[in-house]
Structures are given as structure tokens and as C-alpha cells.
Amino acid sequence: MRRLRVGLAQINCTVGDLPGNARKMAGALEQARALGVQLLAFPEMTIPGYPPEDLLLNPSFIRDNLKTLEQFCPLTKGLTVVVGFIDRKEDIYNAAAVLHDGATAGIYHKIFLPNYGVFDEERYFEVGRRYPVFRLNGLTFGVNVCEDIWYPDGPMVVQTFGGGAEVIVNISASPYHAGKAHTREEMLATRAKDNTAAVIYVNMVGGQDELVFDGQSLVMDGDGEISARGPAFSESLLVVDLSLEAVFRARLHDPRRRHRTLQYSNEPGIDVISLPPITAPHHRPARRKPRIVPEVEPLLPPLEEIYQALVLAVRDYVHKNGFHGVVIGLSGGVDSALTAAIAVDALGKDHVVGVMMPSMYTSTESLEDAAELSTRLGIRLMTIPVTELYAAYLKQLTPAFEGRPADSTEENLQARIRGTYLMALSNKFGWLVLTTGNKSEFSVGYTTLYGDMAGGFAVLKDVPKTLVYQLVRHRNSRLDAPVIPQRTIDRAPTAELRPGQTDQDALPPYDILDPILQAYVEEDQSPEEIVAGGADPETVRRVIAMVIHSEYKRRQAPPGVKITPRALGKDRRMPITNRYKPMD
């Protein structure tokens, strides 16, 4: 019986950290070697990290990436290893190297280059044109990269029908958004069944700027059934004993394959590469290896999945960028409470500091709730009032403001003083400021430039307000005691910049606002379509006007975690100067 022990090294790479990424690869390789793995696969762009963006325009970066691959290659003695890197020929390519027994056996160049959403691969890479397959220990496997497997008529078809591949190894750096794991697995199951081939899918894990990669690597048999699945949002080495007999039997029973094989057998670009046998002593015959029972980690419930994505993104952004900890302005409200809880879960309580900055408008309830939250989380709480400084600002501005009534200018002054306080603490102690605004607020501009927008990382930037409440309740439902005070959840949201203020003074209720924003921002629905769905026409007109008018603010906002299919920022690139007004 033909068996192959495969390993899926789901590792957390950092863009540009070539030595660090190589050390992670070497560690996973030695672990795989100890477990008798014969074929080990790493994620897309393992060596440079993903996405390297304009580092790809630096020839020395490409050269150093190639040198790192060259230095790693001898370590693969006794194994076959698939690793992602940047290849350079007449141009540069997003590539996968197949390293066999200490030497380079072949290279695959990514064919389908995504150029939508957060992706810009056509900006950097040349398109691949060849379809290598590799014969190892009596089986044939093909290698392709991420986007390549999403196309029904893509490289997998050529490699399985034209090249005879029974197994496809897809190395990937697939960014997370809520629910994507289900969609991805449905797609992979379809590819496996349509091509009667096993799929080895290895995905990167970790946070990189706005993106977070969820891992959840998997092995799927030729019937589209999952044999193994790695964990979400953590590194792992998934090891599976892969049997190809089922694939062979299924192909015998499907005479239609012979017609398609004939169709693709003359496809230009198919390279069949035979890999010589490995005789290293740690690769004994399969029957002598202890059987490994593969892990099938369950998919996470939706809210836990989103929460873990936010936690990992914060942890990696802070650690990979060399900050000692974080500081958060606590208002007693639900957004700052959730941000603080995520930060503690990501970094530990000793690396999170809360700052309460009360004004004359701050309620007793807000002060009490911020203190209670800090106690429950176990974090240090500093209190730095803004009242005296605010009065000094008003005094200095009185001559310039003469004859003008008070308005949002005076309100925003308070927010900007708070932003100055937080940035001063950041400078003095090396803390990263986590801003607390949510997607609903960023979308309509219910934010203050250089005030509550001042900071280094916007944890909730892609989390609508209604989802904020769901995540807060989810965090409080964990086995440990609730950390967010119930009164914080129950109170009407307010910026407390004037007496009796609530968010609904300026905005529609969030349960009305968020569906409109989802339809317009994420789904590109027209105003007419949104109204046809049951929304009030005047509310739609007002919300869309706020979204358009606030683009200049969003362009200056800190980066934040992407957790929806279309986040503000790279996913949605709108002009600041824009006179197109829907529903005029």
C-alpha cells in the first residue's frame, strides 16, 4: 500500500525577518524529522513573510531571500520540503521551491496573482507558466500557491489530469475574515472531488499589520472529506499518514477521467520531475513507523473565531513592532472596555495600562465603570483630568472665537487633549496607544482627528458597533468571571463631551445604522437598493453623505484588524476629493 507521511508546518512568519523565519523553518523541520515525516510543506512566502509589499522593489531584499533559501536547502537532507519564497529569473515570482534530500529539485511559479481587496500581486510579480509535478516513492504530487487552487480550471486540473498528480500541495497565506474558513473548505472539497485528488493545504498563521492569518491547515482526501485540520490562530505541525490507494481506486471507477487526461496530456508547460529515493536511516519503511492519529481541530464558533483573531492581531502587532506594552484611554464605555479585554488576553495584564481622563462632563457611572473594569482585568489605572487644561485652551482661544457660538469645536478640544496625554505616555514609556473607535464610527466620521483617533493601532476599526456588543457579551460568558461591568453594556453609548450627550444625538440607532453601512460599504449596494431593502430614504441619504464626507479622516486613521470581507483601508480605496453624490 502506498503511504506517505506528510507534515504541514503552520508557522507564524514576520515580513522581512529572514533569519527569524528561517529559524522557525529549521525548528519545524527538526520536529518533522523526529516524527518520520517524508514530505513537509510550509506556507506561501515563508522566507520573506507575507505580504512584503514594496520590499519587493528592493533588489537586495530579493537577493537576501534567495540566499536564505540557499542556506536552508542543505538542512532538508533526508526529506522533501515545499517552501514559499521569491524567485528571480528575468523577473520576480511568487514561488514554491521543492527541496529534496538537501538539493533543489524544482520550482513552481504562482500563476493566478490576486489583485483585489488587500492584494496587489500584479504590481510586483510575473505570472508563472509551467505546471511541475513530482514523483516520489511511487506517487505523484503537484505543487501550487494559494490563489491557484481557487480557480476550477486552474493549475490543479492540469497537474492532476495532464501530469497525473494524485496529491496537490497548496501553500497559502490566506488572510482571515469572519466565516472564510467555511468558504475555503467548501472550495477545497470541490477541488478534491472534481479532480479525484488528495489536497494538502498549509496556511500561514499570525498577524501582519492590518491582516491576520488563521492557519487551519488541512488534509483532504479525494472524496473531499477532511482527514486532518490544524488549530486556528496558533502555530502547529500537523502530521498525517496519507494513503493514495483510495484515490487510485476512485480513478479506476471513473472512465470520464481518461477523456480529460487525453485533453490535458499535451498541455504545454507540464514538467514531470522524478525525485530519487531517500535512503537516510530515519526514513524506514512505512510499516515500521508508529501510526499517527491525525488531529481534526473543530472550527471555532463565529464569535470566538472573531475574538481570537483580534487577540492574535494585537499580540503580533505589539510584539513584532517592539513595543513594551499598550496604553488605552478608558471612558467607562463599551468600546474601550472591549479593547482593554482583548489587550489583556493578548499581552497579559502587566503589559496593559488604562488611563481615565475625566472632564466636567464625565459621569460618576463612567468613573466607577472604568475603575471596576480595571480591577476585574487586573490592570493599572491612571487618572489624568482634562478639566484645567481644557479651561486654559478655551481662555487662549476666546479672542479668536469671539462672536461664535459653542459647537463641536469645544467638544473636540477635549478629545484632542486626551489624545495628547496618551501620546505623551506612549513617548515616555514606550507603550503603543490602542485606539478604541469601531467601524460604525470610522465609517460615518463620528471620530476626532488627533483626538480619539490618535494612536498606533485601531483594534475595533473593522468591528461594527452591534458586533462590539456581541463580542462583549461573548467575552463575559467565558468560564472566568465577567470582566466588563453590566452597566457598561446597558448604558446608552455616549462621548460625554457635553451635558446629556448620547451617540444617537448625531447618529441613527446602531441597529439601523450598521445594516445600512454593511450594504453600502461592504456590499456596494446603491442607495435605491438599500431603500428597497426596507431602510428609510432620508436616513440612507444622511448616512451615505457622512461616509463620503469622512474619507479624509479615514485616510489618516491608524491601521486596524481586518475581520470582515471588506474592511476600511486597503479593501476599500476611495478618493478623498470626490464630488460623486449618490441620490442627488
Image: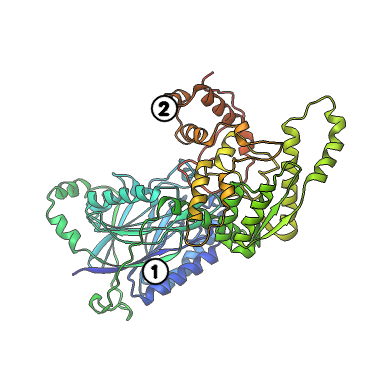
Residue 57 percent location from the top left of the image? 56, 49
Could you give the CA–CA distance between mark 2 and mark 1, rounded to whole angstroms? 60 Å
Residue 89 showing in the rendered view: no
**Nearest to N terminus: mark 2 or mark 1:** 1
Residue 62 showing in the rendered view: yes
The amino acid sitting under disc 2 is Gly
In the rendered view, tell whether residue 482 sits above or below residue 545.
Answer: below
Q: Secondary structure at mark 2?
A: loop
Front-most of residues 358 and 31: 358
Q: Secondary structure at mark 1?
A: strand
Quarter of the C terminus within the rendering: top right
Residue 396 percent location from the top left of the image? 86, 37
Q: Residues within 10 Å of mark 1 (few under 14, many from 20)?
A: some
The amino acid sitting under disc 1 is Ala
Residue 50 percent location from the top left of the image? 49, 54
Residue 4 percent location from the top left of the image? 27, 68
Which residue bears the numbered disc 1? Answer: 103
Between disc 2 and disc 1, the foreground one is 2
In the rendered view, tell whether residue 283 sits above or below residue 497.
Answer: below
> Left or right: where does residue 397 sit relative to residue 93?
right
Please name the residue shown 41% across and 74% down the image: 31
In the rendered view, tell whether residue 252 sits above or below residue 442.
Answer: below
Scheme by which the image is coloured: rainbow
Which residue bears the numbered disc 2? Answer: 533
Front-most of residues 220 and 266: 220
